[in-house]
């Protein structure tokens, strides 16, 4: 499974010869992130804010995408959606692996929602706070899910990201086994060791 990070919460995941894009953002809506122009077989958005819902910027191939994607209802805040509305968690199945994209999750997971994502091979998790769970909450969520590979997203680093959200290091300092990649792409397999994987935007 090939995972490419296109900044903020936008990822393209390729498995079994098909690719899926999660949470593309509109031009100019994420500081420090350039325009998204991608081609894929399917696109999924966690919610309808313009830094996550730019479906029109992803050119679809027209092929039927056989990759299974489950949707889990959640919220964009810790008040049942009263502040920022609903959020959808996506679970992608491919190559015998499970990848979970939490979108703009705003609360800890319990019950059936937690059961659905437990033991995932890869977890894409927001860590910046303010609009989403913060670093400390993200660590608790990641621990409760127990994914083998955890990839932080939706944070501030240098000139990338909103001024009001937290920095990457606020999360990584809480984690062990942090591995920094010199590119925006990693390959995930059954033998990929447990780690917190930090990807490099734009490379």
Image (cartoon, grey):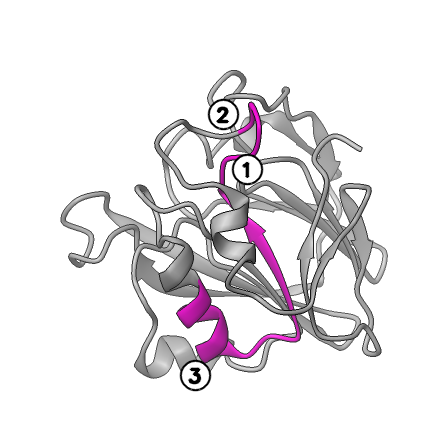
User: Alpha carbon of mark 1 to alpha carbon of mark 2: how far?
Assistant: 7 Å
The CA distance from mark 2 to mark 3 is 32 Å
Q: Are marks 1 and 2 in contact (CB under 8 Å)?
A: yes
Q: Is residue 42 above or below residue 57?
A: below
Tell me what residue is drawn at x 30 percent, y 42 percent: 130
Q: Of callouts 2 and 3, which one flags the residue occurring earlier in the amino acid sequence?
A: 2
The residue identified by callout 2 is 30
Q: Which residues are magenta?
A: 139-160
Label 1, residues with CA under 10 Å away: few <14, some 14-19, many ≥20: many
How many marks the image carries: the answer is: 3
Circle on res. 8: 1
| Horizontal arrangement in the rendering, residue 47 relative to residue 66 (left or right) | left
**Residue at disc 2, secondary structure:** loop
Q: Earlier in the sequence, mark 3 or mark 1?
A: 1
Q: Label 3: state its secondary structure.
A: helix
Residue 133, horizontal then vertical, whole percent: 35, 54
Q: Is residue 6 left or right of residue 95?
A: left
Q: Earlier in the sequence, mark 1 or mark 2?
A: 1
> Which label is found at residue 115?
3
């Amino acid at each position: 499974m090939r995972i490419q990070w296109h900044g903020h919460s936008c990822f393209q995941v390729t498995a079994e010869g098909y690719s899926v894009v999660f949470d593309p953002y509109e031009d100019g809506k994420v500081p420090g992130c350039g325009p998204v122009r991608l081609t894929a077989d399917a696109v999924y958005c966690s919610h309808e804010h313009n830094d996550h819902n730019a479906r029109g910027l992803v050119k679809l191939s027209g092929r039927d995408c056989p990759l299974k994607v489950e949707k889990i209802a959640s919220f964009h805040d810790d008040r049942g959606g009263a502040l920022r509305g609903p959020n959808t968690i996506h679970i992608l199945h491919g190559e015998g692996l499970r990848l979970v994209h939490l979108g703009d999750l705003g609360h800890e997971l319990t019950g059936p929602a937690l059961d659905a994502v437990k033991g995932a091979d890869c977890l894409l998790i927001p860590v910046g706070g303010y609009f989403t769970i913060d670093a400390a909450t993200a660590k608790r969520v990641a621990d409760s899910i127990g994914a083998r590979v955890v990839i932080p997203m939706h944070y501030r680093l240098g000139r990338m990201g909103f001024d009001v959200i937290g920095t990457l290091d606020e999360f990584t300092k809480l984690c062990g086994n942090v591995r920094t990649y010199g590119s925006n792409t990693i390959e995930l397999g059954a033998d990929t060791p447990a780690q917190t994987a930090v990807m490099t935007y734009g490379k």
